[in-house]
Amino acid sequence: MFTLALSKFEPVLGLFALQCHMRNVSLNFQKMKKIIFIFILNCLILSIKAQTFNENIADNIVIEFMEDYLYKFSQHFDKLYNGENLFDNKPIRFEDYKNLKDNLESWNSIFKDSDVNIDSIFNNNDKLFIISQLKSQKDYLWNIDHNVFKFDTSDNIASDKSYFRLSMPLLNESKEIIIIKRILFCGDDCGDEWIEIYKKINNKWTLISGWGYII
């Protein structure tokens, strides 16, 4: 009796089952879209917050500055360096962080060749933040595709070639001021070292100070 009664509803039950199946497919598709969206969003967040250079500064901040820095340098390097446009992709250390920490109250005593009052540009919190960047600097290589400068990827650059090396740009606590070192190697007893300080003014990195000396 029960079987007979149930058989009368088989077409209706079949339609209901089909609707449930389609609903599950739709729900699963919506769920999958949500998962994919969250995955892409997380990838974007990770790419923005990626820290290749040190544990304090996101990659996009460093890369943005480096692109602007190289563009500015390319505007006048021909006149200064006779067209030598080779960079070593291995970065240099800006300074020993222990030395900076031991002389926290007077960075002017470290950079004696400068006429700039560095202690008036960077307060102690800025200095400690810079030290933390140096302390957490990672083992990275510059990977920059530039239309003027070539970044050499060999283990050792030929001794008869002149080339530049760059330090990691270091930011103050507010991330509005950057200090960076550039060195030119051009053979035995030949080269120079240059330090520059940039400040973000009207959303543009502007050179506010620079000094150097012949190696």
Image (tube, rainbow, N blue to C red):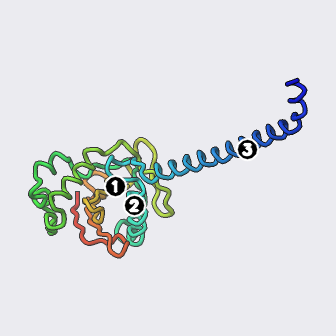
Residue 41 % position (x, y): 53, 51
Specify which label sits upstream in the sequence, 1 or 2. 2
Is 123 left, or right, of 172 in this rendering? left
Q: From mark 3 to mark 1, how far is it between C-alphas?
A: 59 Å
Q: Is residue 16 above or below residue 82?
A: above
Which element is circle 1 on? strand
Q: Quadrant of residue 84?
A: bottom left
Is 23 left, or right, of 88 in this rendering? right
Q: Which circle marks residue 23 in the picture?
A: 3
Residue topped by disc 1? 166
Which element is circle 3 on? helix
Position of the N terminus by quadrant: top right
Q: Is residue 158 above or below residue 191?
A: above
Q: Which circle marks residue 66 in the picture?
A: 2
Q: Are marks 1 and 2 in contact (CB under 8 Å)?
A: yes
- What residue type is disc 2 on? Met
Residue 21 % position (x, y): 76, 39
Query: Which residue is more in the foreground, 182 or 202?
Result: 202
Query: Which residue is more in the foreground, 156 or 97?
Result: 97
Q: Which circle marks residue 180 in the picture?
A: none
